[in-house]
Image (spheres, rainbow, N blue to C red):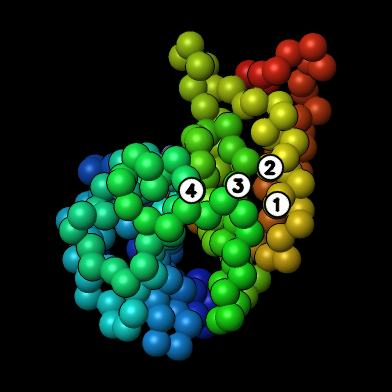
Amino acid sequence: MEIRRIADQIFYLPATEKPLSADVGIVCCGEERWIFDVGASEEAAAAVNGLPGHKKVVLSHFHPDHTGNIASVKYDALYAGAYTCKKLGTGEAVCEQRYFENGIHLFPLPSSHAKGCVGLEYGGYAFLGDGTYSAAKGGRAVYNAGLLRELIVTLEELSAEWVLQSHREPFLCLKAEVVAELREIYARRDVKEPYIFV
Ligand SMILES: [Zn+2]
């Protein structure tokens, strides 16, 4: 599987639809390889296992297209939201912002899409997984208004100029554009309703 370059130390394996497998982010920090999501395809697992160095895996959320390969990839440390750790029965929970000496920043991402979303920021780029997406409720796409407001604040506080959202073409987007889209959705809310249908 072809590893694509985003910046000097930042790469990714693109998502696939058959099988449904999320993008795998790769950040190279010295001897360490920080892997953001492990995907669900055999190809993605083989590509991750083929990387050199110490591997630190971060899971954006518990959905199987992001976590499916966790039993087949080898890693030295695993970080995820508390809910994901509970679901998988392993990993170190990211319950608040964490800054590592090498510049890696992990942060909880208030998300309508799934419980316990986590993002990873490094060198001006932030991997967000599915965190900016809606949830499905009664067959409709919906945001939780309170979580959407918190999400917008969280994104604005990141120093990253660029964000990477799973399954999206283009994968790389300006954070300001993503925040503007989310603000537009938030502006459509009915203040009496907790949900915003989109
Ligand atoms: Zn998801």
The amino acid at mark 3 is Leu
Mark 4: which secondary structure?
Answer: loop
How far apart marks 3 and 4 lie (CA) works out to 9 Å
Q: Earlier in the sequence, mark 2 or mark 4?
A: 4
Mark 1: which secondary structure?
Answer: helix
Which residue shows up at 62% across the image and 54% down it? 96
Residue 143, image x, y percentages? 62, 26
Q: Which residue in the protein does label 3 denote?
A: 109
How far apart marks 3 and 1 lie (CA) works out to 8 Å
How far apart marks 1 and 2 lie (CA) works out to 6 Å
- Position above or below: 55 against 58: below
Q: Quadrant of the N terminus?
A: bottom left
Asked if residue 180 shows in the view, the reply is yes
Q: Which residue in the protein does label 4 denote?
A: 81
> How many residues crowd around disc 4 within 10 Å: few (fewer than 14), some, or many (20 or more)?
many
Question: Mark 1 and 2 residues: CB-CB less than 8 Å, in contact?
Answer: yes
Number of numbered tags placed on the structure image: 4
The amino acid at mark 1 is Leu
Residue 49, image x, y percentages? 22, 70
Split into quadrants, the picture shows ligand 1 in the one at top left
Which residue shows up at 66% across the image and 19% down it? 195
The amino acid at mark 4 is Gly
Q: Which residue in the protein does label 1 denote?
A: 155
Q: Which residue in the protein does label 2 denote?
A: 151
Q: Earlier in the sequence, mark 3 or mark 4?
A: 4
Locate residue 131 relative to residue 179 in the image: left or right. Answer: left
Question: Mark 1 and 4 residues: CB-CB less than 8 Å, in contact?
Answer: no
Residue 188, image x, y percentages? 77, 23
Using the image as rendered, state which of residue 59 and residue 167 is in the foreground.
59
